[in-house]
Image (tube, grey):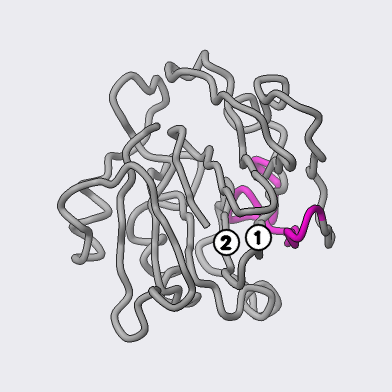
């Protein structure tokens, strides 16, 4: 499995069987629109910085509702959650996605606004290998809240997302604040995250910032 980051909350996950793109954004946020073909596109919620399905080529299977899906040996589980701390009354609902392929579990938290996860959500996220988590605050959890949720999930690898990067026009905190809070960020961001189950860290969790592809 190979994971790439287009910026903001948009990732590409590639396996030998399929390509998944998560939360493609509109370029009006200041970043270049995601590009390429996909077999599956998943959308965590219907906001312009997460739902630009038209940017993706091919004829992808689009997932934008909670539920269980299987496409080309990829299993996708959409888990209901909230975009705020008052059960969706301010910003509505959000979908957490658990994506399984090649014996690896990747969780994408979308625009999670909950300060903590429920027991039911945690049960669905049991055994996550890679956690893609928002850290920039404002409309989502902030750095401190992200660390608390990481401690709840206990993934093997954490990849921060939804934070301030050059050219991004949204008002978000930067990566430094999160790295200071969690204390274990790698110093250099990587271009692609190549994963094999046998090579995942077993004892110490790794926090791996990524470069925008």
For the point 75% across and 58% down, the residue is 78
Q: CA distance from mark 2 to mark 1?
A: 6 Å
Q: Tell me residue 125's x, y (percent).
A: 62, 73
Q: Earlier in the sequence, mark 2 or mark 1?
A: 1
Please name the residue that numbered disc 1 is placed on.
Answer: 99
In percent of width and height, residue 34 lies at 54, 25
Placement of 138 over or under 103, stated as above or below: above
- The quadrant holding residue 38 is top right
Whether the magenta-drawn stretch holds residue 72 is answered as: yes
Q: Position of residue 29 (x, y in %)?
A: 48, 19
The residues colored magenta run 71-91
The answer to whether the residues at label 2 and label 1 have Cβ atoms under 8 Å apart is: yes
Which one is nearer the viewer's eye here, 194 or 22?
194
Q: Which residue is mark 2?
A: 107
Residue 208, percent from left and from top? 31, 57
Q: Quadrant of the C terminus?
A: top left
């Amino acid at each position: 499995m190979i994971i790439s980051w287009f910026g903001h909350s948009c990732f590409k996950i590639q396996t030998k069987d399929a390509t998944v793109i998560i939360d493609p954004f509109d370029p009006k946020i200041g970043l270049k629109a995601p590009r390429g073909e996909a077999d599956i596109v998943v959308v965590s919620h219907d906001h312009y910085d997460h739902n630009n399905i038209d940017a993706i080529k091919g004829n992808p299977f689009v997932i934008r509702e909670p539920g269980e899906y299987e496409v080309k040996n990829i299993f996708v589980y959409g888990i209901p959650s909230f975009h705020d701390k008052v059960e969706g009354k301010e910003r509505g609902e959000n979908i957490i996605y658990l994506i399984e392929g090649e014996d690896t579990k990747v969780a994408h938290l979308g625009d999670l606004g909950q300060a903590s996860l429920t027991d039911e959500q945690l049960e669905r996220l049991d055994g996550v290998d890679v956690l893609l988590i928002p850290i920039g605050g404002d409309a989502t959890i902030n750095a401190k809240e992200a660390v608390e949720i990481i401690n709840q999930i206990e993934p093997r690898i954490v990849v921060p997302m939804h934070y301030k990067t050059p050219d991004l026009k949204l008002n978000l905190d930067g990566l430094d604040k999160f790295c200071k809070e969690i204390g274990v960020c790698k110093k250099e961001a990587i271009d692609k995250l190549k994963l094999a189950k046998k090579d995942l860290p077993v004892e110490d969790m790794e926090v791996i910032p990524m470069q925008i592809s």
